[in-house]
């Protein structure tokens, strides 16, 4: 049986806090370095509307790489599978999320999957709109719809900090432009992508989005099919194979649910047909995943038999 109380979750949070100081906050983006290492929160949202949460649940954080799943869903809605996967692959990689190596060695030179930075840039490039501003507005409205929260916005300070330090992502984008994977102005794409990564919410909102994916794209609060069933299936599959950076295989064995992490410390989980999970813990391990968040999910998986395998 899954969690049935806030107190139950709080006990798990207290245990997971023990590993916080084994990690560090992300400091390669200056604005993220300001995060308070001690923060940790978790929320579970069920299709019947129940929400259980514990820890620093009102703390907002930016999605960072979690946004890659949501941008992929929108790009697939906009263009369909054939178009998207002609331009980005479907295979996991053992390389770091910001590596350029496979772009140089793969033929054709397209990113291996949408969850690494190169693939995410290619996917964000595909979001339809008349301008960068219109494309971002479409994405954020989509995320507001998924979370049932019209107040969700983005953190301007973090977006600017990411934009100012995005030279490696620029290099990835220029390489792909050389090979016609990307065809737009690179600075416009950087503006869109850094704002996308800086979209901000708390773990309750994230759990609601995870629940929509768990319910095959249907928002249980509104009964609206926001994401087509096949698109939700594709997104969850990428979460299993590539969602936890180059620790995805280990995570599949130890936890066994579709999940996506971000370097601000967020983790979104989707337990198929059961619930969504939102976690925030900015202290990261050496792969870029929330160290206490991973510990929390490992304990939850054992206690509640979460693994889908």
Image (spheres, rainbow, N blue to C red):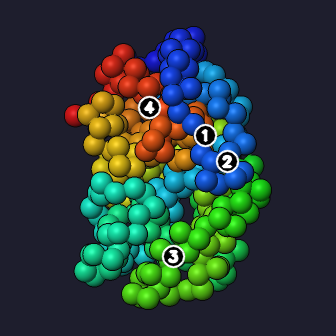
Q: Count neighbours of disc 3 (C-alpha within 10 A) and say few if under 14, some if 14 to 19, many if 20 or more.
A: some
Decide: marks 4, 3 in contact (CB < 8 A)?
no
- Percent from the top left, x then y, of residue 205? 62, 40
Label ID, residue 294: 4
Label ID, residue 117: none
Q: Secondary structure at mark 2?
A: helix
**Badge nearest the viewer, 4 or 3:** 3
Instruction: Give the Cα separation between the discs numbered 3 and 2.
Output: 22 Å
Circle nearer the N terminus (1, 2): 1
Instruction: Give the Cα separation between the discs numbered 1 and 2.
Output: 7 Å
Circle nearer the N terminus (1, 4): 1
Circle nearer the N terminus (2, 4): 2
| Residue matched to label 3 | 171
Q: Residue at x 30, y 30 (%)?
A: 254
Q: Residue at x 34, y 57 (%)?
A: 95
Residue 116, by quadrant, is bottom left
Decide: marks 3, 2 in contact (CB < 8 A)?
no
| Residue matched to label 1 | 25
């Amino acid at each position: 049986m899954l969690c049935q109380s806030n107190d139950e979750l709080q006990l798990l949070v207290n245990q997971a806090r023990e590993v916080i100081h084994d990690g560090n906050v992300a400091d390669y983006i200056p604005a993220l370095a300001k995060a308070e290492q001690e923060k940790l929160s978790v929320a579970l949202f069920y299709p019947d509307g129940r929400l259980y949460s514990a820890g620093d649940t009102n703390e907002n954080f930016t999605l960072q790489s979690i946004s890659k799943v949501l941008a992929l869903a929108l790009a697939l809605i906009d263009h369909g599978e054939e178009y998207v996967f002609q331009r980005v692959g479907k295979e996991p990689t053992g390389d770091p999320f910001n590596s350029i190596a496979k772009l140089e060695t793969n033929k054709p030179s397209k990113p291996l999957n949408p969850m690494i930075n190169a693939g995410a840039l290619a996917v964000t490039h595909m979001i339809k709109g008349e301008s960068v501003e219109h494309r971002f507005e479409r994405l954020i409205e989509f995320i507001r719809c998924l979370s049932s929260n019209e107040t969700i916005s983005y953190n301007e300070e973090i977006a600017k900090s990411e934009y100012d330090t995005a030279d490696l992502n620029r290099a990835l984008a220029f390489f792909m432009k050389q090979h016609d994977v990307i065809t737009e102005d690179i600075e416009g794409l950087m503006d869109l992508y850094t704002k996308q990564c800086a979209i901000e919410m708390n773990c309750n909102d994230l759990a609601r989005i995870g629940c929509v994916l768990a319910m095959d794209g249907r928002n249980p609060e509104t009964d609206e099919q926001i994401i087509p069933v096949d698109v939700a299936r594709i997104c969850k599959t990428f979460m299993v194979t590539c969602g936890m950076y180059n620790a995805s295989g280990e995570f599949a064995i130890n936890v066994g649910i579709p999940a996506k992490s971000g370097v601000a410390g967020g983790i979104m989980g989707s337990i198929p047909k059961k619930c969504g999970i939102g976690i925030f813990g900015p202290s990261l391990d050496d792969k870029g995943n929330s160290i206490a968040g991973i510990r929390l999910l490992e304990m939850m998986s054992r206690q509640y038999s979460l693994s889908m395998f």
